[in-house]
Every structure is written in C-alpha cells, then in structure tokens.
Image (tube, helix red, strand yellow):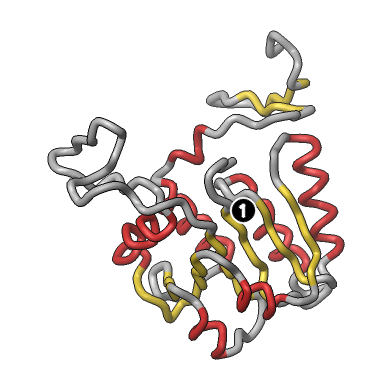
C-alpha cells in the first residue's frame, strides 16, 4: 500500500488451538486497515493460510510471513517500533509524534491547515524522511526487553480489551482514515456496499447485479 515505507504488523507469540482465531483476526485487520505485511510465529500456519486465502480472493497487495525469530525481528528492525500494550502512553497523545517519526503527514500540522508549496506539512520545514514501521501485537506474555526496545509503547484506552481492537484503532488513527478508501489490486471478488443485503460480485464484472 505504501511505496515510500513499509508498515509491518508482528504478532508476538501464538498458542495453537487457543489463539488461532485471534491471530487470524490480527492478520485480517492488518490487511484491511493499511498494513503492508504481517509476520506470524512459525506455529501459526493455519492463520497464515487463512489470511493468504482472503488476500487472493479480495485483493492486495499484502504479504504474510511465518518466522520463528520474533525477538531478532524486533531487535534488528531498521525503523520505528510501536508496541501496543494496555500499559502504554495514550494513543491520542502520541499519534502525531509517531506519524512524524515515520514521515507521514500530520493532519493537525500547519497554520490554519495550509501546506507549503511542495506539499510540506506545517511550518517547521520538510516532513521527516519516510521510515518503516513495525507494530507489535502481543499474543502472550511479552518480555520486558520488548518494552525497552520499542520506540513507543502505546495504549488504546489503557483498559482490558481485544488486541485486535487495539490494532484497528491504532492503524485508523495512524492513517487518519485514509486507509478506508484504499483500492485493492488483483481481487477475484468485490463486496458491493448497500444499505441492506449482502452482494458479492466478480471483481471484473462491469455491473453489480
């Protein structure tokens, strides 16, 4: 989705049988709400196949990986690392700083909403150069080292709830809703929005019947 930077969601930890549905939904949410890639633990093969199947049918691009070296991924990531946790800073307090860190335009920047002649946001010079972003979503107890490695530990409401909900809110606030208008490439099927009914058509059809 993003030519200048990659947005990666890492599902940290997976308990087969217990976490299958939640891990799958982390991947589906990452895909639907603007990420470019999801990385699952190597024991989450069923979830990976489901997300790949959805991508094949409803479009991409979106990549799915199975990796066993999750700690190494976090340690060696060359970009900004965000860890979603109930105990983190409030998302509404840090979302602008995160956008700035990865070089995304901030809708709250600028004077009276004006942009510079070159599309620069704000009055403090050019936006930061694009940087990749790793969003870590815990599936089991997360080691303290991850909290220390993360550039941002971010909480959505600082209340107990689903990690899928936290990921969805974070991505939507990161992209300021722009991800909702994404167009999908190479889709076999397309859902037709309508007040009532459930219409799915072949993506190459000119008309929705």
Q: Position of residue 14 (x, y in %)?
A: 75, 75
Q: State left or right for residue 39 relative to residue 182.
A: right
Which quadrant of the view contains residue 32?
top right
Which quadrant of the view contains residue 146?
bottom right
Question: Which residue ends up furthest to the bottom in the rendered image?
Answer: 144
Residue at numbered disc 1: 30
Q: Quadrant of the C terminus?
A: top right
> 198 or 138: which is nearer to us?
138
Crowding near pointer 1: few (<14 within 10 Å), some, many (20+)? many
Q: Position of residue 108 (x, y in %)?
A: 24, 48
Q: State left or right for residue 149 relative to residue 63.
A: left
Q: Quadrant of the N terminus?
A: top right
Question: Which residue ends up furthest to the top in the rendered image?
Answer: 206
Task: Tell me which residue sits at (67%, 74%) in the image.
Answer: 12
Q: Position of residue 75 (x, y in %)?
A: 61, 78
Up the image or down, 9 lies above or below 155; here it is above
Question: Which residue ends up furthest to the left in the rendered image?
Answer: 112
> 44 or 95: which is nearer to us?
95
Up the image or down, 143 lies above or below 18; here it is below
Up the image or down, 206 lies above or below 102; here it is above
Task: Tell me which residue sits at (36%, 53%) in the image.
Answer: 128
Task: Tell me which residue sits at (49%, 77%) in the image.
Answer: 150
Which secondary structure, mark 1?
helix
Task: Tell me which residue sits at (80%, 48%) in the image.
Answer: 52
Up the image or down, 155 lies above or below 115; here it is below
| Count of numbered marks | 1
């Amino acid at each position: 989705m993003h030519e200048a930077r990659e947005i990666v969601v890492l599902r940290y930890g997976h308990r087969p049988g217990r976490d299958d549905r939640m891990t799958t939904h982390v991947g589906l949410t990452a895909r639907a709400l603007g990420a470019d890639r999801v990385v699952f633990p190597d024991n989450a093969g069923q979830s990976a196949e489901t997300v790949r199947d959805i991508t094949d049918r409803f479009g991409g691009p979106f990549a799915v990986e199975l990796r066993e070296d999750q700690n190494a991924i976090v340690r060696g990531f060359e970009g900004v690392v965000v860890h979603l946790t109930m105990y983190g800073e409030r998302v509404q307090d840090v979302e602008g700083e995160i956008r700035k860190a990865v070089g995304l335009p901030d809708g709250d920047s600028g004077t009276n909403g004006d942009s510079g002649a070159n599309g620069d946001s704000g009055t403090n010079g050019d936006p930061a150069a694009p940087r990749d972003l790793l969003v870590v979503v815990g599936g089991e107890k997360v080691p303290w080292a991850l909290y220390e490695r993360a550039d941002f530990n971010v909480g959505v409401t600082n209340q107990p709830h689903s990690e899928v909900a936290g990921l969805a809110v974070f991505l939507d606030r990161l992209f300021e809703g722009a991800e909702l208008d994404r167009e999908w490439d190479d889709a076999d099927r397309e859902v037709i929005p309508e007040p009532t009914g459930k219409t799915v058509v072949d993506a190459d059809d000119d008309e929705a019947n």
